[in-house]
């Protein structure tokens, strides 16, 4: 085993009714060039044959483990997977997404290169490409700028010391991505932004973060996810720097105004950047959201 292959990478993946996609996801993991990995699949009460398919693939490779203990929510499933993990580097992966070739190696190498005895909490941020049967959402690279990685759960790699600060994810949250991205950005001793596209993110009607859906469904789902910013601002569990707490408060305040349909309040918020205000404004009313959905590729990735 080469030096680059020596880091054990734990890939945490919750599953819920992913029968159509789970085999493709697992195969994309097992075909990675960085073979020192473990894939921990936690089923969240699937009612289809997701578990049977996952277990069938696990029988052929001891690196895959399947845990099925009933409904516990997406966050609970991620927390369970982390509790079972042993890796030096932690990745998160949706049950419907796919890892391109070299995804694990690129992130493991970035974390390893940035880790020192005085900087043990390390994050690597990379990029994703969407894919979808709907051409509006297919083929978008996020972020567009190759010098910057996305602060989104599926594109991030965490050193174990940094992951131990992020986990367990607070149980009242409905999803992991904003919490993980927030902790990674605020508490890393060091980080690397890499240009690699490390995730193929599938957009379809069953996404927990719905796109192409009705405005009422989108706004409720988004508001539930954005609660993470308020928790990041107020948490006493981890020592988030005060500068970052202020930033999270601003994001939470802007979201509250967006959810209330207060377009003027969003656009005139004094503490928020124009990028933050324009993103929120584009989802503040049904008419603006319709334009954003129609022009997804124009608005995304900046």
Image (cartoon, rainbow, N blue to C red):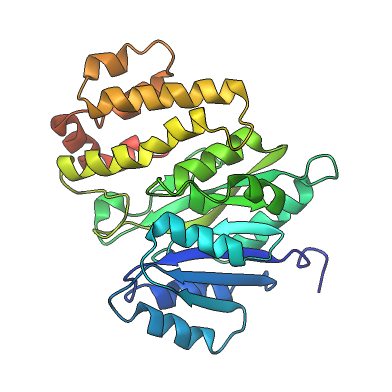
Residue 94: image quadrant is: bottom left
Which residue corresponds to the image point at 46% horizontal and 88% vertical from the top-left? 56
Which residue corresponds to the image point at 55% horizontal and 70% vertical from the top-left? 40
**In the picture shown, does residue 159 fall above or below 45?**
above
Foreground of the two, 107 or 241: 241
Is 244 left or right of 55, judged from the image as shown? right
Residue 18, percent from left and from top:
34, 71
Is 92 left or right of 171, judged from the image as shown? right
Foreground of the two, 289 or 65: 65
Is 160 left or right of 147, judged from the image as shown? right
Q: Residue furthest right?
A: 117
Residue 69, percent from left and from top:
43, 73
Residue 80, percent from left and from top:
52, 63
* Quadrant into which the N terminus falls: bottom right
Q: Is residue 147 visible?
A: no
Which residue corresponds to the image point at 61% horizontal and 52% vertical from the top-left? 157
Residue 57, percent from left and from top:
49, 85
Q: State the count of labels.
A: 0
* Quadrant into which the C terminus falls: top left
Which residue corresponds to the image point at 14% horizontal and 33% vertical from the top-left? 286
Q: Is residue 60 visible?
A: yes
């Amino acid at each position: 085993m080469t030096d680059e292959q020596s880091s054990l990478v734990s890939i945490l993946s919750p599953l819920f009714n992913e029968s159509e996609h789970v085999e493709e996801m697992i195969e994309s993991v097992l075909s990675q060039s960085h073979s020192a990995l473990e894939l921990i699949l936690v089923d969240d009460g699937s009612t289809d044959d997701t578990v049977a398919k996952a277990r069938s693939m696990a029988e052929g490779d001891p690196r895959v483990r399947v845990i099925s203990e009933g409904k516990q929510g997406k966050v609970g499933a991620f927390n369970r997977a982390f509790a079972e993990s042993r890796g030096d580097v932690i990745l998160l992966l949706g049950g419907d997404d796919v890892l391109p070739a070299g995804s694990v190696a690129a992130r493991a190498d970035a974390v390893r290169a940035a880790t020192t005895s005085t900087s043990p909490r390390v994050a690597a941020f990379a990029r994703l490409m969407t894919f979808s049967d709907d051409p509006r959402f297919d083929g978008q690279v996020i972020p567009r700028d190759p010098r910057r990685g996305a602060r989104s759960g599926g594109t991030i790699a965490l050193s174990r010391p940094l992951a131990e600060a992020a986990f367990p994810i607070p149980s009242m949250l409905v999803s992991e991505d904003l919490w993980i991205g927030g902790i990674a950005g605020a508490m890393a001793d060091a980080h690397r932004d890499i240009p690699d596209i490390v995730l193929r993110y599938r957009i379809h009607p069953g996404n927990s973060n719905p796109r192409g859906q009705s405005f009422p469904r989108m706004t409720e789902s988004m508001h539930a996810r954005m609660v993470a910013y308020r928790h990041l601002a107020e948490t006493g569990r981890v020592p988030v720097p005060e500068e970052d707490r202020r930033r999270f408060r601003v994001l939470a305040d802007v979201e509250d105004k967006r959810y209330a349909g207060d377009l003027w309040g969003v656009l005139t918020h004094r503490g928020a950047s124009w990028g933050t205000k324009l993103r929120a404004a584009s989802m503040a009313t049904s008419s603006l959201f319709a334009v954003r959905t129609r022009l997804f590729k124009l608005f995304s990735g900046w």
